[in-house]
Image: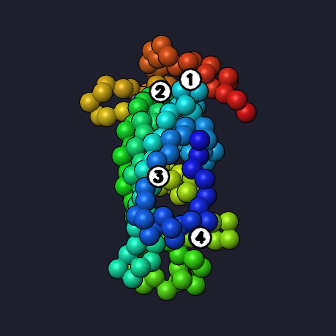
Amino acid sequence: MLPASIMAGELAELVARSASRTAEFTVADCARLAALVARCSAADQSVIHAVISFAADAEGRPLVRLQISATLLLECQRCLEPFAWQLDEQAELRVLRTDEEAAEVGEPMDTVLLNEHGLDVAAMVEDEIIAALPLSARHPDNSGCQPGVTVLADDEVVEEAVRPFAGLADMLGQRRPS
Ligand SMILES: [Zn+2]
């Protein structure tokens, strides 16, 4: 289940207690992230584990610390097969109440906005995961994965590598709930 939003009063109380919360949910709960992982139902069911801790900075302003771990299935940009990618991400975000407060933060620092709907913890965790994804996801270089199609200089396609599971991801993808 996605972590619920935290309203201002509750946030102040969590900060005062230096409280921590844990949350566990799946990629399928995160629409933006789900669009970025491999297109198979196993990728959608990958579990994300998050620890959300609350503290105050030197000036007493609220800070949120995130510890996020998950094994995500990403589509390898070389062979187009899913591969497991381990995510271990930590972040510290300063909680700001208004956009004006955001403009006042001089040094570049990660911030999150507390608005009239509270602090959107689920979106905060999802944002951190998306920011941590590799720009070009691919199997490790020594894994021996091959491009599915080799293109010569004259653009003649000469070889399509054998990919026994090539159809599997598409097949699973078709069963994905829309
Ligand atoms: Zn690959």
Asked if 67 appears above or below 24 in the picture, the reply is: below
Say which mark, if any, is on residue 69.
Answer: none
Image quadrant in which the C terminus is located: top right
Q: Amino acid at mark 1?
A: Ala
Residue 89 coordinates in the image, percent (x, y): 38, 51
* Marks 1 and 2 in Cβ contact (< 8 Å): yes
Q: Amino acid at mark 3?
A: Arg
Element type where label 2 sits in the image: loop
Q: Earlier in the sequence, mark 2 or mark 3?
A: 3
Q: Amino acid at mark 2?
A: Glu
Horizontal side of 66 relative to 26 (left or right) equals: left
Q: Which residue is mark 1?
A: 169
Q: Amino acid at mark 4?
A: Ala
Q: Earlier in the sequence, mark 4 or mark 3?
A: 4
Element type where label 1 sits in the image: helix
Q: Please state which of residues 79 and 125 is positioned toward the viewer in this rendering.
A: 125
Which of discs 2 and 3 lies nearer the camera? The answer is 3
Color style of the picture: rainbow
Say which mark, if any, is on residue 21.
Answer: 3
Q: Earlier in the sequence, mark 4 or mark 2?
A: 4
- Disc 4 versus disc 1: distance between alpha carbons? 43 Å
- Disc 4 versus disc 3: distance between alpha carbons? 16 Å
